[in-house]
């Protein structure tokens, strides 16, 4: 299974519901295919277990729905029960080498007696963490990713055994939507955390200067909201 051998694209303009269905179906099918295939250097099957690494914090209502649907769908389609585990990396609020090491130590200790057959990376930051940690924590274990933006997918040098889905969530599409909502759009205000601290929109940092060149930019990023 080579990098991006099983890759598809989801343009978010098609609708969040459509993308979510493609996301879930694709990842479940890929998990079943990978778990059912013999390992390259052994006749034994991979462990019947999946570890989902979510880049966000634990308070994601969407992830709760996804996790429940993923687990039930996987075990409905698979002839043998598959254990599904999930961990939240909270990469929007924490990062850097020290946080990486804390996560690696935690995951290594927690799953030391629970072999993992497939790692699912949910989000661009989660995928980057997995690529940094795979040799130490899951050597040779297949990785399936989803909710990774197209620009990040192109930038990463994905090794063999890593595959997944890419979506198009560009700043250009956000500008196009704003133009539909605001006639004669002239100014764009950027608010929220700096892009480098946003797991989902980190690639916007490179896109904004190009795709918003014709507008007046008001940069309010990083400012605290007065209460």
Image (cartoon, rainbow, N blue to C red):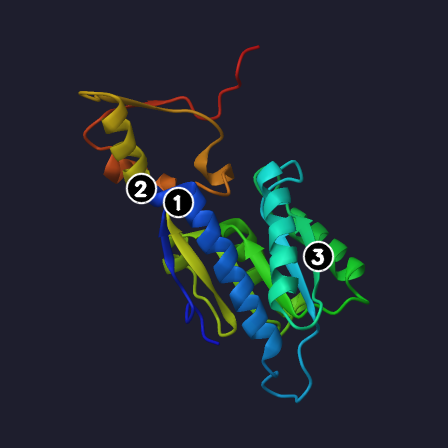
Q: Nearer the viewer, residue 83 or 39?
A: 83
Kindly check if marks 2 and 1 are in contact, taking CB atoms under 8 A apart as contact.
yes
- Point out residue 160 in the picture as x, y percentages from the top left corner: 49, 74
171 sits left or right of 118 in the view: left
Q: Which residue is mark 3?
A: 85
Counting other residues with Cα less than 10 Å from the Cα at mark 3, is it few (<14), some (14-19), or many (20 or more)?
Answer: some
Q: How far apart, in angstroms, are the residues tagged by discs 2 and 1? A: 7 Å
Pointer 1: what residue?
Answer: 203
Relative to 191, 87 lies left or right: right
Q: Quadrant of the C terminus?
A: top right
Q: Comparing marks 3 and 1, which lies closer to the viewer?
A: 3
Rendering coords of residue 82 (x, y %)? 69, 66
State whether residue 135 is above or below residue 121: below
Check disc 2 and report its element: helix, strand or loop: helix
Q: Residue at 52% of width from left, 67% of height from top?
A: 30
Residue 151 seen by the camera: no
Task: Identify the residue position indicated by label 2 in the image.
Answer: 207
SS label for mark 3: strand
Give the CA distance from mark 2 to mark 3.
Answer: 35 Å
Separation of disc 3 and disc 1 at Cα?
Answer: 29 Å
Instruction: Residue at 74% x, 69% y: name it.
Output: 115
Mark 2 residue crowding within 10 angstroms, few (<14) / some (14–19) / many (20+): some
Write down the quadrant of residue 219 in the picture: top left
Sequence-wise, the earlier of marks 2 and 3 is 3
């Amino acid at each position: 299974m080579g990098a991006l051998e099983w890759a598809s694209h989801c343009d978010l303009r098609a609708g969040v519901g459509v993308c979510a269905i493609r996301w879930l179906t694709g990842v479940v099918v890929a998990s079943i295919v990978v778990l059912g295939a013999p390992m390259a250097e052994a006749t034994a099957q991979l462990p019947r277990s999946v570890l989902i690494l979510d880049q966000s914090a634990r308070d994601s209502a969407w992830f709760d729905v996804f996790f429940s649907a993923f687990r039930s769908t996987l075990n409905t389609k698979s002839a043998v029960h598959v254990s599904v585990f999930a961990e939240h990396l909270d990469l929007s609020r924490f990062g850097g080498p020290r946080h990486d090491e804390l996560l690696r130590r935690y995951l290594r200790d927690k799953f030391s007696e629970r072999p993992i057959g497939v790692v699912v990376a949910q989000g661009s930051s989660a995928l980057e963490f997995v690529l940094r940690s795979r040799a130490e924590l899951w050597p040779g274990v297949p990785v399936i990713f989803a909710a990774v933006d197209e620009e990040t997918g192109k930038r990463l040098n994905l090794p063999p055994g890593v595959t997944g889905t890419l979506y198009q969530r560009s700043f250009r599409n956000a500008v196009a939507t704003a133009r539909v909502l605001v006639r004669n759009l002239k100014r764009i205000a950027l608010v929220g955390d700096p892009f480098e601290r946003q797991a989902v929109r980190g690639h916007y940092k490179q896109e904004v200067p190009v795709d918003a060149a014709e507008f007046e930019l008001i940069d309010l990023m990083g400012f605290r909201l007065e209460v």
